[in-house]
């Protein structure tokens, strides 16, 4: 089973790029974040025509939004609202009677890494804390599960272009990294990408639009993740980060991450 996750940054604007990804990588399941479309605005017919008729979509107007489109039958299991906000950041499905998959879009957190001064950062930390509690209370490490999405945190020193310079930058601050690692430890989640690509190797999935030449400066961060619970750790067969997608016409600032599982 091939799982792809991608913060597409507007599914309607970048539908041609999503169809390019499908043609190039042929995932069995494609998870999208930041779709920026109400559910009735989602291009369901285009994905169905491309061979992905099974869909679970949670949307809102102009912001956020997550979707799962699949060649395999899926059954939606939950759409969780965190922090009392209906802001379209989660959907989970069961894939073809097999593992449950959670598609998440964690809040970015704004620019100031101080929850007292920045309500967006406070919301991010609250979201992560609630996510940790909810998973611990409702799921088990013994369940075969997959968690994917734009988690908006680069946890390792090699997940950012400069660990020292980004320690005070939202997405790599110690408090965020600790929160993400706490979620990961809660159910023993395995970082599927780092399971195959050594932690010593620099790896990014996001490059800012602000860079004049993103490839030359290469000031990236690994914000997009695929995790699996322990029963699936041995099934991780291959991973890839489609760095070239950052150079596509009308590119997202994120690139797709793909994981192959032998189920």
Image (cartoon, rainbow, N blue to C red):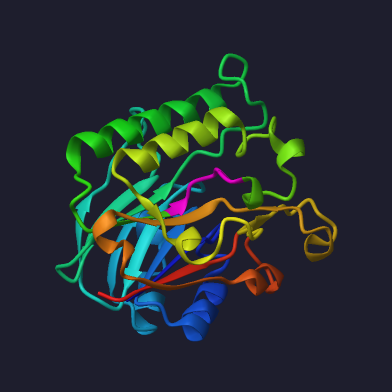
Query: Quadrant of residue 41 in the image?
Result: bottom left
Residue 180: give x, y in percent of width and height: 46, 38
With 68 as the anchor, is 247 left or right in this view?
right
Asked whether 115 or 136 is in front, the reply is 136
Q: Quadrant of the C terminus?
A: bottom left
Residue 75: give x, y in percent of width and height: 18, 63
Query: Quadrant of residue 191 in the image?
Result: bottom left
Q: Which residues are magenta?
A: 149-156
Tally of marks: 0
Q: Does residue 22 lie above or below 90 as drawn?
A: below
Residue 136: give x, y in percent of width and height: 24, 36
10 is within the stretch colored magenta? no
152 is within the stretch colored magenta? yes
Q: Does residue 32 lie above or below 176 as drawn?
A: below
What kind of secondary structure does the magenta stretch mostly adopt?
loop
Residue 202: give x, y in percent of width and height: 66, 58
Residue beneath the point at 78% across and 65% down:
215
Residue beneath the point at 38% across and 43% down:
184
Q: Residue furthest left?
A: 97
Residue beneath the point at 55% across and 22% down:
119
């Amino acid at each position: 089973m091939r799982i792809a996750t991608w913060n597409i940054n507007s599914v309607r604007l970048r539908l041609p790029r999503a169809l390019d990804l499908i043609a190039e990588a042929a995932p069995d399941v494609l998870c999208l974040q930041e779709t920026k479309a109400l559910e009735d605005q989602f291009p369901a017919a285009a994905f169905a025509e491309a061979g992905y008729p099974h869909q679970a979509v949670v949307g809102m107007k102009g912001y956020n939004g997550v979707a799962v489109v699949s060649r395999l039958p899926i059954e939606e299991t939950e759409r969780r609202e965190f922090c009392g906000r209906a802001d379209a950041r989660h959907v989970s499905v069961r894939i073809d009677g097999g593992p449950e998959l959670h598609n998440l879009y964690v809040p970015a957190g704004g620019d100031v890494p101080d929850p007292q001064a920045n309500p967006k950062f406070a919301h991010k930390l609250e979201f992560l804390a609630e996510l940790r509690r909810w998973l611990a209370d409702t799921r088990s490490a013994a369940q075969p599960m997959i968690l994917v999405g734009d988690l908006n945190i680069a946890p390792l020193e090699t997940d950012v272009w400069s660990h020292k310079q980004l320690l005070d930058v939202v997405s790599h601050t110690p408090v965020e990294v600790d929160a993400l690692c706490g979620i990961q430890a809660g159910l023993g989640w395995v970082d599927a990408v780092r399971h195959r690509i050594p932690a010593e190797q620099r790896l990014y999935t996001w490059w800012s639009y602000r860079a004049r030449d993103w490839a030359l400066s290469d000031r990236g961060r690994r914000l997009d993740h695929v995790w699996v619970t322990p029963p699936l750790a041995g099934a991780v067969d291959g991973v890839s980060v489609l760095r070239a997608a950052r150079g596509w016409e009308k590119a997202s600032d994120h690139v797709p991450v793909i994981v192959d599982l032998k189920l």
